[in-house]
Amino acid sequence: MVAARTTILNKLGLHARPAMAFVQVAAAQGSEVRVRRVGSDEWLDGKSIMQMLLLAATEGTEIEIECVGRDEEEALARLLQLVVSKFDEE
Amino acid sequence: MPPASIGFTMKLREIVVEAAIVPCVKATKRDAVIGELVDALVAAGVISEADRPSLVKESIARERKGSTGFGHGVAVPHARSTLVTQPRAAVGLVPGGVEFNALDRQPVYSVVFLLSPAGNPDAHLSAMETVFGALSQESFRRFLRQSTNAADVLSLLDEVDGLRAQR
């Protein structure tokens, strides 16, 4: 299991399009992916768009991403890259 | 994993405009369904007739970038506008289903058209959270699809808001 914290940087937050981008990257990996707001104990399935939209993470929200599986290192790196790159939105 | 409940701040009834519930959408194509729901917001007095074309256009352009048909027979087309100061939504039920290019490639039976205030991304996210808090529940989707009139939809929304308030 690998996990990391990161911050949502894009101004519009994790709205539908970036949430979809996240799910697409997560779903392409074999590892389980789960996400939560830092401070919350409710984990959301990173491969489910319905659940990722529930995150409602605004700009500046700290989230934690956890990956479990054979490609967990790669999965986490790709997801972090996506968040840090502001989902190519700005 | 159960649906999460992270800080629901808005109620469905604060977002959904009662007079903009369309229990039996006549249109059968995606763009026309979106148009009919924007019409409902015009009829409800939320926006004016003059604003209709730009909102329909924006929402359809958004669909082309990626469908808001997120699976399980529901879609949430949306637009951002300076015409509203808080998120407002129309709800349309399409008994025969409509092709929305949905993620699961299945027809859509329940459409929530969400109009969010431009320049207030937090309000949009909060509204999406509230809408998906409901739509992510199988029972809500089923009852919504089975509704045949606005009163059914309203009591369903009230029920969800009430359950949330208890948490």
Image (cartoon, grey):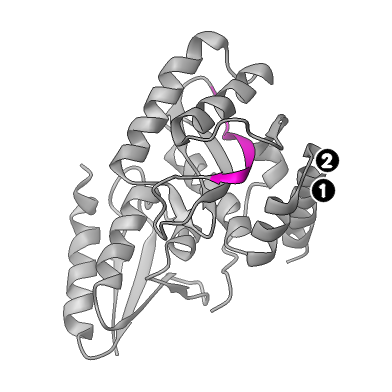
Please tell me whether the stretch drawn in magenta is mainly helix, strand or loop: strand
Q: Which residues are magenta?
A: B84-97
Q: Residue at position x 69%, y 65% from top? A: B139
- Say the numbered circle drawn on residue B145: none
Q: Give the residue at mark 1.
A: B155
Tell me which amino acid carries mark 1.
Ser
Where's residue B54, x and y in %? 41, 18
Mark number for residue B151? 2
Viewer-proximal residue among A27 and B130 = A27
- Chain letter for mark 2: B
- The quarter of the picture where the C terminus of chain B appears is bottom right
- Residue placed most toward the observer, A43 or B72: B72
**From the viewer's perspective, is residue B74 above or below residue B87?**
below
Q: Residue B30's spot in the image, x, y percent?
A: 46, 36
Q: Secondary structure at mark 1?
A: helix
Q: Quadrant of residue B18?
A: top right
> Taking B66 as reference, is B151 left or right?
right
Q: How far apart in space, not on screen, are marks 2 and 1 (Cα)?
A: 6 Å
What secondary structure is found at the residue carrying circle 2?
Answer: helix
